[in-house]
Image (spheres, grey):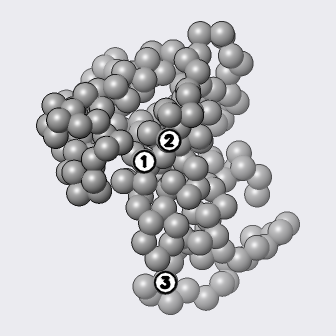
Amino acid sequence: MNRREAVQSLTLLFGGSVIGGSAFLSGCKTSTGNDRVFSQEDIAYLNEIAETILPATNTPGAKAANVGQFMTVMVNDCYTEADQKIFHAGMKKLDDEADKTYNSGFMKLDGAKRTGLLTKLDKEQKEYAKSKKKEDPNHFFTMMRQLTMLGYFTSEIGSKQARRYIETPGRYDACVPYTKGEKAWA
């Protein structure tokens, strides 16, 4: 299975509702020259957001998989210009919300405060999704959360360490034993 097939499978697994998901089927766009360049600080910031969403436990977290770098590629190459603007504005909004709530930027917050802030944003985006019309813009946190999950579970760390992995090149083996409570298959 190549990466495109894996991403298509994940898109179907997530209900086909990944923002920018149509790019997986049609290929990514070529750069228009209007793409905002993400700095190394932006990538570190996105890695911290992703790590708060999928923290390290007995398996490595999203930062270990460098999900922040994955997000930048997906946003620049596969998102519409409107969604790119929403994503970039959302990065600033998240930091502004941290400053407003805790008098400190997101990067300086401890884990509990970061989790509290992202939990608040998750509730906000769920409420937004309930009343969202087709023509309404996407919520930035929905994009961040989806990209975190997609980036992590399509990475080598996510596939081989967070999930069970048995390499079966060239064939599909449906008869691998599974015991209740074990990790999901990659």
For label 2, the residue is 44
Residue type at tag 3: Glu
Q: Position of residue 120 (x, y in %)?
A: 19, 44
Examine the rendered structure and indicate whether residue 143 appears above or below residue 174: above
Position of the C terminus, as image quadrant, is bottom right
The residue at 46%/40% (across/down) is 46
Position of the N terminus, as image quadrant, is bottom right
The residue at 78%/73% (across/down) is 168
What whole-number distance in Å separates the C-alpha atoms at marks 2 and 3?
32 Å
Examine the rendered structure and indicate whether residue 179 appears above or below residue 163: below
The residue at 58%/55% (across/down) is 65
User: Could you say which is closer to the camera, residue 157 or residue 137?
Assistant: 157
Residue type at tag 1: Glu
Instruction: Name the mark nearer the viewer: 3 or 1.
Output: 1
The numbered mark at residue 48 is 1
* Secondary-structure class at tag 3: loop
User: Could you say which is closer to the camera, residue 143 or residue 117?
Assistant: 117
* Secondary-structure class at tag 1: helix
The quarter holding residue 103 reads top left
For label 3, the residue is 182
142 lies left or right of 159: left
